[in-house]
Image (cartoon, rainbow, N blue to C red):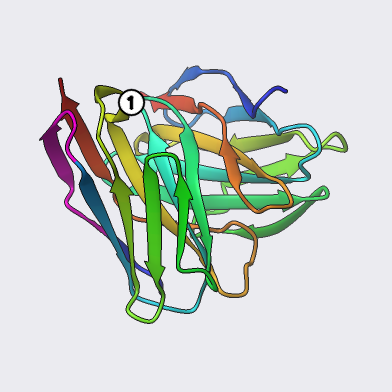
Amino acid sequence: KQEVTQIPAALSVPEGENLVLNCSFTDSAIYNLQWFRQDPGKGLTSLLLIQSSQREQTSGRLNASLDKSSGRSTLYIAASQPGDSATYLCAVAPHNNAGNMLTFGGGTRLMVKP
Amino acid sequence: EAGVTQSPTHLIKTRGQQATLRCSPISGHTSVYWYQQALGLGLQFLLWYDEGEERNRGNFPPRFSGRQFPNYSSELNVNALELEDSALYLCASAGTNEKLFFGSGTQLSVL
């Protein structure tokens, strides 16, 4: 059974810092890995999707990497801003891509202080 | 273009009642997914509908059920509500690039 872990559970940084969020998964037979952002009481916003054959994806100040063999992904946020404050979730899709039956990590709650 | 829409935003029920949650996917998306986000349990996959058929379900009892209509909108029904069913229920739809787009959710409170 796939398990996804995110470390740290919470993170507080001053504005402008570069930061790294970590995600690990136990079964490396994945189809893709996705990073989402969730604001309090809201749904999820897709940030980046990395296919199992890819090593990284970039969007603006965000960069996500994937090391499938070691079961790890990192989300790098450059020059953090208060508007980046949210919970960040990573999720993996099973290798047979039985739909988007994602397994989610518990999330990292990020606070960026002005 | 409208995103995934869910209704109602909030729903309050008592134990033993039934709840019906609704979801409209993004235009052109044929797959709808339901997830439950309960306090302390994180996000868990509930149900997947595609082209009107239930394709898979997560580890939830049969009192969680649903359907998908010809216009690809979907309903989630929860029968015989229990206190632990209190959660944020999120609906998502997927396009051809496999990215999931989520609605804002229905907050279900069971008293």
Left or right, residue A63 beside residue A47: left
Q: Residue B7: x, y in percent?
A: 60, 21
Above or below, comparing residue A53 to residue A7 in the picture = below
- Residue A14 can be seen, yes or no: yes
- Residue shown at 48% from the left, 49% from the top: A48
- Residue B79 can be seen, yes or no: no
Q: Quadrant of residue B86?
A: top left
- Residue shown at 62% from the left, 74% from the top: A96
Q: Residue A106: x, y in percent?
A: 29, 51
Callout 1 secondary element: loop
Above or below, comparing residue A23 to residue B36 in the picture = below
Q: Residue furthest bottom?
A: A69
Tell me which amino acid carries mark 1: Pro
How many numbered tags mark residues here? 1
Question: What residue would you read off at disc 1?
Answer: A40
A102 within the magenta span: no
- Residue shown at 72% from the left, 23% from the top: B1
Left or right, residue B81 beside residue B72: left
- Residue shown at 52% from the left, 71% from the top: A52
Q: Quadrant of residue A109?
A: top left
User: In front: A25, or B63?
Assistant: A25
User: In front: B72, or A108?
Assistant: A108
Q: Which stretch appears magenta?
A: A6-17
